[in-house]
Amino acid sequence: MSMGQQVRPLDGLTVVSLEHAIAAPFCTRQLADLGARVIKIERPGVGDFARGYDERVRGLSSHFVWTNRSKESLALDLKQPEAVPILHALLEQADVLVQNLAPGAARRLGLGFEALHERFPQLIVCDISGYGEGGPYENKKAYDLLIQSEGGFLSVTGGPGEDEQAKAGCSIADIAAGMYAYSSILGALLLRERTGEGSRIDVSMLESLTEWMGYPLYYAFDGAPPPSRAGASHSTIYPYGPFPAGDGGTVMLGLQNEREWEAFCHQVLRRPELAPDERFNTNAKRSDHRKDLRTIIIDVFATMTAEQVIERLEQAQIANAHVNDMQGVWQHPQLAARNRWGEVESPVGRLPALLPPGRNNAFQPRMEAIPALGQHTRAILEELGYSAENIEAFHATRMI
C-alpha cells in the first residue's frame, strides 16, 4: 500500500479538547497519532499552562513538545458568552470531547454530559480528573506528585530509609490517566458503532495509578507488610538491580529462577560453589541475605569493566541492561536500528520525535506540527462560517 493510499484508524474523526498539563494532552496526542483531528482550545494569550513549564527545547516546553504534536490550537475564552456558539458549532461536528479542567469547571461551562448528550447524542465525552466524580475527594486539587502520594506509589519507591521515598522521574499518574482515557475512548467509539449513541467516560488519576499498583497492593493483602523500598533493586527478587563494575560503570541485571541462578554462579561469577550455598539456594534466601550476596557480586564485578560483565551475562543468558542517562536513550542503538525516530515541525523548526509504540504495518502514524498558541484560530472560525469582520470583533474583545 502506498503512502497516498494509507488509511489511519481514526481518519475523519474530530476531537475537541479542553486540556492542560499532561493527562488529557497525552491522551489526545495519541488519538492524533492514529489520524484524528484534534482541536485544542486554549486561553487567549496564556494557553495550556504546560507551555510555560520550561524552555528546554529551543525555547519550547519539554512537556508541551512531547504531548501536543499534530494538533490545531484554537484560542478561545470560554468565559465570554459569545464563545459558546463557537464551541457548540465545533461540538456539532465532533466525535469526542476531552476535558481535564479544574473540578466542576466543565459543568459550570454547561459541558456536563447530560446537557451535552441531549444536544449532541453521538458525542463521546471523556472527563479526566484527579479523583473522579463523587466521593469526599471530588473537588480536591490533584497534581501528579500528589496522586503518587495518595495512591501509595511513594510508599514503595525509593531507598530503605524513612526519608528516602522517591517520586517517579516522569509524570506517571498523569500518564496512567492519559492511557486509560485513550483506550476508553477507543472502546467508546466501538460501542457507538453498535448503539449509535455517545457515552461518558470518567477517568480518575487516582484509580488509574492504583490499578498500576496491583502487585504491591496484593503483596500487602489482608494487613500483610508491604514490599520494602529497595532503591533501583527489586524488593522481593534478588539479585535484581544495579551493580557497579570495576571501570566505574553500572550494570543492571535480573534473575528470575533457579536455572538462571546456577548459570549466574557458574558462568558469570565463576564461583560454582555458591549455587548450592544454603544462604542463596532459593530466591527467598537470596533476598533475605542480599547484603552478603551483594558484597560477593561487587567483589567479582570489580575485576571487570561494565561491558565485560554484560558479555558474561549475555553468554549465560542472564537478563541485563545498560544504565542509560537521557543522552544514552537519545543515542540508543536499538531505537536507531528500528528507525524509531521521526521529525515534526514546530514554531522553532523541526524537532525529533519518537514514533508511537505499537508499529502497525498497514499505516504510518500521523506526525505533524506542534502548534503555536492560537495558530489555527482564524482558519477554524472561517471553516465554521465566521467572516473576517466577526473575527476582528472577537479579537477586539480578546475572546480569541
Image (cartoon, rainbow, N blue to C red):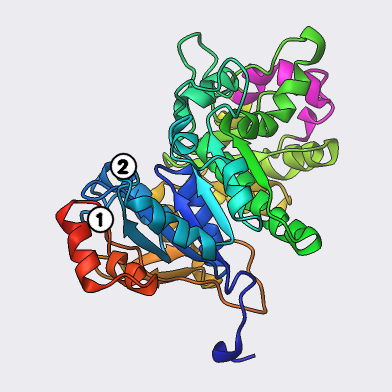
Q: CA distance from mark 2 to mark 1?
A: 17 Å
Q: With 181 as the anchor, is 279 left or right in this view? A: right
- Is residue 170 or residue 117 the one in the foreground? 117
**Residue 38: x %, y % from top left:** 47, 62
Q: Which label sits on residue 400?
A: 1
User: Which residue sits at x=42%, y=61%?
Assistant: 331
Q: Secondary structure at mark 2?
A: helix
Q: Is residue 306 visible?
A: no
Q: Which label sits on residue 49?
A: 2
Tell me which label, 2 or 1, sits earlier in the chain. 2
Quadrant of the frame with the N terminus: bottom right
Res 225 quadrant in image: top right
User: Which residue sits at x=28%, y=60%?
Assistant: 374
Q: Are marks 2 and 1 in contact (CB under 8 Å)?
A: no
What secondary structure predominates along the stretch shown in magenta? helix
Amino acid type, callout 2: Phe
Q: Secondary structure at mark 1?
A: loop
Q: Which residues are magenta?
A: 272-294
